[in-house]
Image: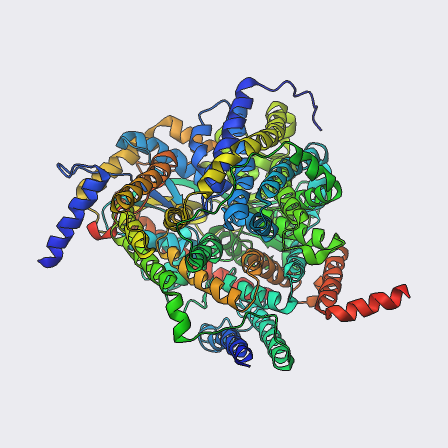
Amino acid sequence: MNQKLGKLAFLALLLCIPLFVFYDIATRFAAEGVASGSAENNAAMYPRLVALLLLFLILIQGARTLMDRSDSAGRGANLSLAALTKYRRSVAVFFLFLLYLSAFRWFGFMIATPLFLVSVQFVLGYRNVIATVFYSGGVTIAIWFAFSKVLNLVLPAGDYFG
Amino acid sequence: MFDLTWFPVGLSQIAFTALGVFIGIVIGVLPGLGPLLGMVLLTPFAMYMEPVAGLSLLLGVFVGGTFGGAVTAILLRIPGTPIAAATLLDGYPMAVQGRDREALGLAVSASAIGGVIGGLYLVFGVPVLASLALRFAPPEYFALAAAGIVCIAVVSRGSTIKGLIVGCIGLLIATIGIDPFAFFYRFNVDTQWLIGGVGIVPLVLGLFAVSEMLAQIQAGNLNTSAGVRSIRIPPSAILDTLKSGINVIRSSTIGTFIGALPGAGSVIAAFVSYAAAKAAAKDPDSFGKGNPDGVIATEASNNACCGGTLIPSLALALPGDPCTAVLLAAILLLGFIPGPQLFTDSPDLISGIFSSYMVANVFLLFFGLFLVPVFVWFVNIRRVFLVPAILVLCVVGSYGVTNSAQDLWFIPIFAVLALVLLKFDYPLAPLTIAPVLGPILEENFRRSLIMSADDYSIFLTRPICTTILVVSAAALFLSLLPENALKRFAKRGTN
Amino acid sequence: MAKNGLKMLLTAGAFALAGIAPAKAEFPERQVQVIFPWSPGVAYAVSQVVADRMGKELGQTMPVNSVTGASGVKAALNVLNSPANGYKVFDGYVAPILFAPLLGKTPFQCEDFEPLYGVGSNGFAIGVRKDDDRFPDLPALISMAKENPGTLKYSGAADISIPHMVAALMLKNANAPARSVPYNDTGEGWKDFISGELDFMVLNSGNYKANKDDIRVLAVMSDRPMSENGIPGPLPKDYGIELGVEGLAAVGWNWWVVKKGTPPEALDKLRSAMKAALDDPATQQKINDLGFTPLPPETFNPGFYTENCRRVRSQLEAGMEAIKWEKEVTR
């Protein structure tokens, strides 16, 4: 029963997508005069159609979920606090990844990358300091060489430094 | 139209084709980077070379790069390029079952054979296919893209409705950013970040690569390696591929034809061939669980597609996709003018392009078989070393294609979305094909209506368009029927 | 203070890691990149030719990177959201630097950039299929459009674009409305023109060169014969039809620019390197081969940029009116 509730909650979340489409069309699109008219200027024509289809599909899926008694196939959603602690490593790496993305632009590839590699290895529980240092330096330089020197791409130098 | 006395090909031509294929495979293997970037990066070199040699280098990258993504798709569940997103559907399950060697062998040989078949169509079918492609106007493109959406339903293993839900979300994601015709930013919630829409490369990398890395961290065993045996692919893989001869020919034909339609592209070719292979199979349920025919279909198709895109590019100076647009620019830079008269004015160049394309596929087979152990070694690195490096490669690869630090934020968003969708048993593949199809679908839908002054009958009065739409609608209807209803119907038919 | 300290520390760290000595910082210390607003193709190759030659002057390779989306606005913002240090040169086309600001879709104006030099222009012409005997000349096309308003179909690339605007202006001046079918990819429009879905097409010099034998040029969209355009043919005014635009407003062009506030040393370095590149006859020849006309650096120099923005902008406003008229009459 809990699983069924989770599935329905997820569908309710998905329902927000078409509702947002309709809302944006009714407000921003309409204000700009592109919510109706001929095909050329009607920016709402196609997204509205797709959103209607999506709405219809979500409702069918919702009805199916409600009627389904067995509910054995799905792995189900069991999102409790206890379950979250099980995810602590991947959650930590995910947050490091977000930090890396901001550092990538502001402090540049050369600073952000080794710091990211060291901290991810730490979070993953790897404790060989020398190996970590060599690894993170080596990977940074190898990637820098491949992209910057061989492929001639410009990696960010860090907007923070002007 | 031209003579076929192009053998023997020049030595420098062969050497640069080989170099191009090698570079192409390596670039294709790197997450996010595909043949387009490789060709763009090598154009400055090619423009100082002898014309046929320069174009051979670019063609080699085109062919090698189109294949390269399949390697990581199969071994790591990371499509190196969006083109390989369909390959992982069956390639990765095969690898999980310990059939990685077989999967890679099939991918290499199907790519090469598909490429050669595409090349044969190119050499012998240029005039016919070029004129056929011209009969596809906006209504037909709309119908074709709609058929692609139906393929989503067929590809989605298990639940068609779930597949279509994800597909519709993908179509809506594709509408974010500037409207194709009116200068209006849609669904950008008034931020600069979204005015250009969602990039397909960060989307694919987030959806498949980063989510997979997080899942692997989740699963633990970080100090062990993926445990892939050091493998060498036996040349008999070619024979295994040829056993599925009909599949190879069908997929290559689909690939060539879709490639010949300017603007359609190899991602669609791969998914349509996959859907066709699944529909034609005796055991469609085994697709998505490691059916070799799934790998063969997608790889034969996307490499045949390269040959297809060359058809309108050379015959009509109409680039079929961004890669051939770069190739046409290179032809111009080398002092030739692409277009119909190229066949009469510079037959040597045309035959050089044809022969290099064929030779490139031979080298693809050779390098593919030869280089695979190197890639397997890479995959076998312990996860605690592999995972962080791949996360960095995803970021740098995405940045290399989009040159935008802002676009990197799509990666974590789609990684989370992927984990949530998987949790609730929704398929991910529709989310890669829908954003590719979306703009084609919308632009041609609205363009048709502009042509007809908002008269919808334009879709029902043109034979090709109407046929595609009717067939697609029928296929969609069949796939939506509950399975037992179909079985009952079939039983009644046989009784 | 603390921020500065941190900044110095990080800067030192960056240099140490990159292995670069921070002593005598002379521009360019690292690679200068060109931000190109479209997908790679022929126009990209033009930029690559200039960047390649300019890189030789600067003593480095100068990559051209394409940042696509939002009709070029995304690339413009990419440059404007980066520090004004001269390391990002924007390949400024009319759509992002003039059209989009004119429509109120950007937080910047043409003048928010510091100019280097103009690069190339791409002229337009009205063309029909060679065997299409409905249209022996421009007056025949105009009179058919007058008699059947809105039934003739043509493509002038994207809806908001120079080729469409020029054609719409001319048709408005002749009071001969036709239906414009927008294509974001000119190639797709070309395909539908060749196959007969469209009646006529606004060609650019590249289209013309590639398909000389299959098309006929009815009129060159210029106020001067052949001139910068590269397409031979009669002018609208030969038939007494007003074109309505002149000079650079009638052609597509690109002008390399950097963010305002770029230090003068960097600006000078970039300008002299670019001028040297553009003055090289080999560069001009390559731009020509690609179907574009090189803009002479004597005229299209940094001093002329603001004037150019102003002149073209006022004519674009007239062009937008013509597009509006066309829609009202044909829909």
The answer to whether residue A64 shows anywhere in this view is yes
- Residue B334 shown left or right of residue A62 in the figure: left
Q: Specify the quadrant that holds the C terminus of chain B.
A: bottom right
- Residue B136 shown left or right of residue B329 in the figure: right
Q: Position of residue A139 (x, y in %)?
A: 33, 42
> As rendered, which of B266 and B489 lies closer to the eye?
B489
Name the quadrant containing residue B14.
top right
Q: So how many labels did they put on this image?
A: 0
The residue depicted at 67 percent of the width and 61 percent of the height is B150
> As rendered, which of A39 and A133 lies closer to the eye?
A133
Q: Specify the farthest residue to the right.
A: B495
Q: Position of residue B331 (x, y in %)?
A: 53, 31
Placement of A38 over or under B364, stated as above or below: below
Placement of B309 over or under C241, stated as above or below: above
Q: Specify the quadrant that holds the N terminus of chain B.
A: top right
The answer to whether residue C232 shows anywhere in this view is no
Q: Specify the farthest residue to the left.
A: C1
Placement of B132 over or under C48, stated as above or below: below
- Residue B75 shown left or right of residue A57 in the figure: left
Name the quadrant containing residue C275.
top left
> As rendered, which of B129 and C187 lies closer to the eye?
B129
**Colour basis:** rainbow
Q: Position of residue B275 (x, y in %)?
A: 68, 54
- Residue B124 shown left or right of residue C145 in the figure: right
Q: Position of residue B369 (x, y in %)?
A: 57, 33
